[in-house]
């Protein structure tokens, strides 16, 4: 009976990939139900309690991920709804994998593979150095003008005029960020006009250009996992809090966050950090 109900429901689905995934889910439910209750399930009579038992089995016995459990539940809700009822059961909350910041050695390797004699090489080093040492968003980097930059022998700053929410802010530049920018400015082509970072053709760089630049550099540097501009921003924020001991309010201003809650996520310790914290207790 339930097999017929499954087949009747699957015929209403639009794509073959969805049909295949839901067929697998529902046949697994069928087997589990027979084993657990000793009788055939009926889609028109299934209860929320039975669905919760199924969810518990998938989570605690099969150890499926939240995404897989939710897909199994979606299939079950679908067949029950097809036969005129609803199944009020919540799915599992997905837990995002923590973003791993780069360590000092990885930052060095990332910058080293970008080194070279061409002006484009100097530009690439300046972009990555700026991002990992100021935490700028990729959209902010590609929107910079040369006049937004002020550098002297002992200090420097950059004005972000196109920040999130169009809010202007001023970000200080570290010694290493200043050095990378100065090297680039010495060879920056005249056709760049007011745009700080341009492509080889003289047009403004797009966010995807920087994303590609960072990804290719991380591959050449042999850094495991996908390194993105957001990871560079995350790296700056994490290092500012853990190594420079920067207070949350200051970091929030530098990053352009509207509230401290957003910035506070960088305080979440990883396993290595927790181990270091309790080592001498």
Image (spheres, grey):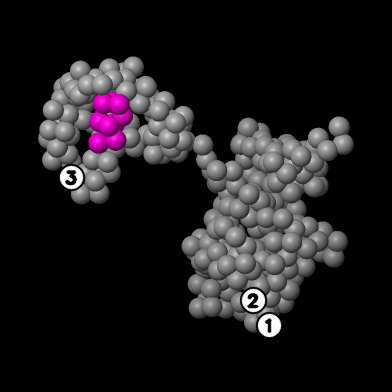
**Which mark is nearer the camera, 3 or 1?**
3
In the picture shown, does residue 95 fall above or below 88?
below
Q: Which mark is residue 71?
A: none
Which secondary structure lies at badge 1? loop
Residue at image x 45%, y 38%? 65
Residue at image x 64%, y 37%? 265
User: Is residue 29 in the magenta section?
Assistant: yes
Which secondary structure lies at badge 3? loop
Residue 189 lies in what quarter of the image? bottom right
Residue at image x 63%, y 55%? 232
Q: Residues within 10 Å of mark 1 (few under 14, many from 20)?
A: few
- Taking depth in this image into account, of 55 and 197 the one nearest to the observer is 55
Q: Residues within 10 Å of mark 2 (few under 14, many from 20)?
A: some
Which of disc 3 and disc 2 is earlier in sequence?
3
**Which residue corresponds to mark 2?**
121
Image x and y of residue 211, in percent: 53, 62
In the picture shown, does residue 92 fall above or below 227?
above
Image x and y of residue 91, in percent: 39, 29
- Taking depth in this image into account, of 58 and 119 the one nearest to the observer is 58
3 and 1 marks in contact (CB < 8 Å): no
Specify the segment rendered in magenta.
27-35
Residue at image x 63%, y 49%? 100
Which secondary structure lies at badge 2? helix
Residue 23 lies in what quarter of the image? top left
2 and 1 marks in contact (CB < 8 Å): yes
Camera sees residue 196: no
**Which residue corresponds to mark 3?**
14
Which of disc 1 and disc 3 is earlier in sequence?
3
Q: Which mark is residue 117?
A: 1
């Amino acid at each position: 009976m339930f097999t017929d109900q499954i087949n009747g429901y699957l015929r209403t689905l639009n794509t073959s990939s969805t049909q295949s995934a839901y067929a697998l889910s529902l046949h697994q439910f069928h087997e589990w139900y027979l084993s657990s209750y000793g009788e055939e399930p009926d889609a028109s009579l299934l209860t929320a309690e039975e669905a919760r038992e199924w969810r518990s089995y998938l989570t605690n016995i099969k150890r499926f991920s939240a995404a897989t459990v939710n897909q199994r539940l979606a299939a079950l809700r679908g067949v029950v709804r097809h036969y005129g009822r609803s199944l009020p059961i919540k799915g599992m909350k997905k837990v995002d994998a923590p973003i791993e910041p780069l360590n000092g050695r990885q930052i060095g390797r990332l910058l080293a593979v970008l080194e070279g004699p061409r002006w484009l090489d100097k530009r690439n080093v300046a972009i990555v150095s700026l991002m990992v040492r100021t935490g700028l968003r990729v959209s902010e980097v590609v929107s910079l003008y040369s006049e937004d930059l002020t550098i002297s022998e002992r200090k420097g700053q950059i004005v972000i005029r196109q920040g999130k929410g169009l809010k202007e802010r001023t970000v200080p530049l570290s010694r290493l960020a200043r050095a990378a920018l100065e090297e680039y400015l010495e060879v920056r082509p005249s056709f760049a006009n007011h745009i700080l970072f341009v492509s080889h053709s003289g047009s403004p760089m797009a966010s995807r250009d920087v994303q590609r630049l960072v990804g290719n550099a991380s591959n050449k540097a042999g850094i495991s996992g996908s390194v993105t501009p957001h990871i560079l921003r995350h790296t700056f924020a994490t290092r500012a809090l853990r190594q420079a001991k920067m207070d949350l309010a200051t970091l929030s201003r530098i990053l352009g966050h509207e509230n401290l809650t957003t910035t506070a996520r960088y305080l979440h310790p990883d396993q290595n950090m927790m181990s270091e914290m309790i080592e001498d207790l």
